Image (tube, helix red, strand yellow):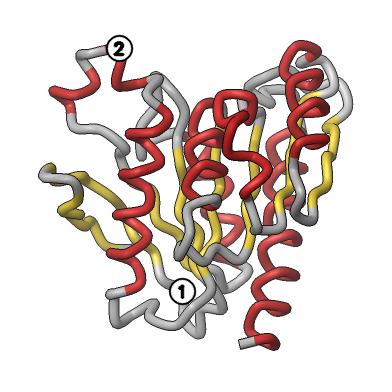
């Protein structure tokens, strides 16, 4: 199910997969980490949980195949955030999701791009979720993020946990940090990814409802 889409942004064409369930109450753009793509099995799992909760999802590639060959692009958070802002504008123009609140779900380096994009003036994002993210890579922009932000980290991912704790202190928006006990960076342990998906679903659902009430 869903639709394979092509997104023209920044002079390139990006591939994506858009799923819009009946009576969707919001749409979440997934921002993958370095070395991943829109086919990430972890992101696809989380997207499925969100779809079951009447949330639309967009999984897309941040870079073209040619761009990925240059490793500098993979870690150019400013470039990735710029792409995400363009993709957000594309979503806002889609008739099947027009007017719906938009959220970002970022993993690893993708979380930094999501937070950076959410700090851009004029970009209205109802909620952000970071899975094992590297918000420190967007350190200079954290204080400008206005979107309610949920940071999810594995309890055994000590280095990333410390980075997220430090980043949360820089955030001026509503934020929470939730730890998945005994989970490592990829949340491969039994039940770990399910917990991530449940946290994300509840965060998006709650903040999308609040956003709709204010609009």
Q: Position of residue 41 (x, y in %)?
A: 47, 35
Question: Mark 1 falls on what kind of element?
Answer: loop
Q: Quadrant of residue 62?
A: top left
Q: Residues within 10 Å of mark 2 (few under 14, many from 20)?
A: few
Q: Position of residue 132 (x, y in %)?
A: 66, 28
Instruction: State the residue position of label 1.
Output: 21
Q: Quadrant of residue 80?
A: top left
- Viewer-nearest residue: 148 or 188: 148
Instruction: State the residue position of label 2.
Output: 71
Q: Position of residue 54 (x, y in %)?
A: 57, 73
Q: Position of residue 207 (x, y in %)?
A: 71, 69
Q: Quadrant of the C terminus?
A: bottom right
Q: Residues within 10 Å of mark 1 (few under 14, many from 20)?
A: many
Disc 2 versus disc 1: distance between alpha carbons?
36 Å
Q: Quadrant of residue 204?
A: bottom right
Question: Mark 2 falls on what kind of element?
Answer: helix
Q: Is residue 145 left or right of residue 72?
A: right
At a point 51% along the width and 42% down the height, the residue shown is 116
Residue 181, compared with residue 11, is above or below; it is: above
The disc, 2 or 1, on the residue closer to the chain's N-terminal end is 1
């Amino acid at each position: 199910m869903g639709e394979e889409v092509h997104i023209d942004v920044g002079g390139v064409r990006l591939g994506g997969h858009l799923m819009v369930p009946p009576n969707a109450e919001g749409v979440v753009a997934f921002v993958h980490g370095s070395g991943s793509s829109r086919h990430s099995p972890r992101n696809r799992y989380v997207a499925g949980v969100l779809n079951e909760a009447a949330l639309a999802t967009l999984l897309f590639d941040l870079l073209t195949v040619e761009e990925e060959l240059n490793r500098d692009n993979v870690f150019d958070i400013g470039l990735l955030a710029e792409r995400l802002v363009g993709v957000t504008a594309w979503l806002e123009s889609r008739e099947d999701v027009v007017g719906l609140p938009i959220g970002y779900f970022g993993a690893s380096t993708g979380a930094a791009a999501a937070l950076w994009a959410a700090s851009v003036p004029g970009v209205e994002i109802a909620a952000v979720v970071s899975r094992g993210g590297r918000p420190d890579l967007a350190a200079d922009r954290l204080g400008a993020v206005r979107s309610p932000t949920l940071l999810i980290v594995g309890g055994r991912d000590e280095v990333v946990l410390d980075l997220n704790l430090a980043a949360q202190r820089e955030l001026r928006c509503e934020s929470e940090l939730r730890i998945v006990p005994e989970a490592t960076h990829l949340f491969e342990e039994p039940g770990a990814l399910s917990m991530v998906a449940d946290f994300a679903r509840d965060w998006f659902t709650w903040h999308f409802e609040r956003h709709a009430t204010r609009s």
